Image (spheres, rainbow, N blue to C red):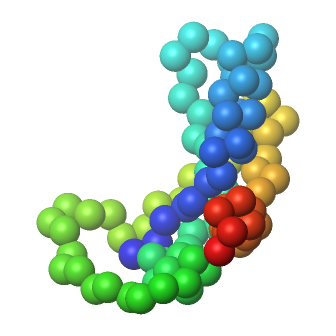
């Protein structure tokens, strides 16, 4: 399974831009994501630790990947923190 992990500060910045933009209408839907899906196994490798395999869940989507085109056009937004950098920052903050 692949997920498009996005750093919380990138998401917060996108929300602030959307709230203050005159280009975005009420109820406008804008996808926000890193546009770079990682497998759960890749995430485990970045974090470190033991792999624990669990059975598939019924109805779970195999790949999620946000299309940031609208965010770029309306908000001039793009992600700034990669998954690797976010994990590195987290490990430094937690001292691991």
Q: Is residue 44 above or below residue 79?
A: below
Quadrant where the N terminus is found in the figure: bottom left
Residue 92, quarter of picture: bottom right
Residue 79 in the figure: left or right of residue 67: right
Where residue 19 sits: x, y (%)? 69, 16
View extreme (left): residue: 58
Residue 48, quarter of picture: bottom right
Given residues 83 and 21, the one toward you in this image is 83
Residue 25 appears in view = yes
Residue 36 in the figure: left or right of residue 39: right
Residue 69 appears in view = no
Q: Is residue 38 above or below residue 16?
A: below
Q: Is residue 18 above or below residue 9?
A: above
Q: Which residue is rendered at x = 57% and y = 53% of the image?
A: 66
Where residue 29 sits: x, y (%)? 54, 29
Where residue 67 sits: x, y (%)? 62, 51
Given residues 59 and 80, the one toward you in this image is 80
Q: Which residue is rendered at x = 57% and y = 69% of the image?
A: 37
Residue 89, quarter of picture: bottom right
Where residue 79 sits: x, y (%)? 76, 51
Given residues 81 and 3, the one toward you in this image is 81
Q: Which residue is rendered at x = 65% and y = 74% of the image?
A: 96
């Amino acid at each position: 399974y692949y997920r498009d992990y996005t750093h919380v500060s990138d998401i917060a910045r996108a929300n602030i831009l959307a709230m203050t933009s005159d280009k975005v209408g009420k109820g406008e839907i804008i996808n926000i994501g890193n546009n770079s899906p990682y497998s759960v196994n890749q995430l485990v490798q970045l974090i470190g630790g033991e792999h624990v395999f669990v059975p598939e869940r019924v109805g779970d989507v195999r790949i999620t990947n946000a299309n940031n085109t609208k965010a770029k056009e309306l908000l001039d937004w793009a992600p700034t923190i990669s998954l690797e950098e976010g994990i590195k920052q987290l490990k430094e903050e937690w001292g691991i």
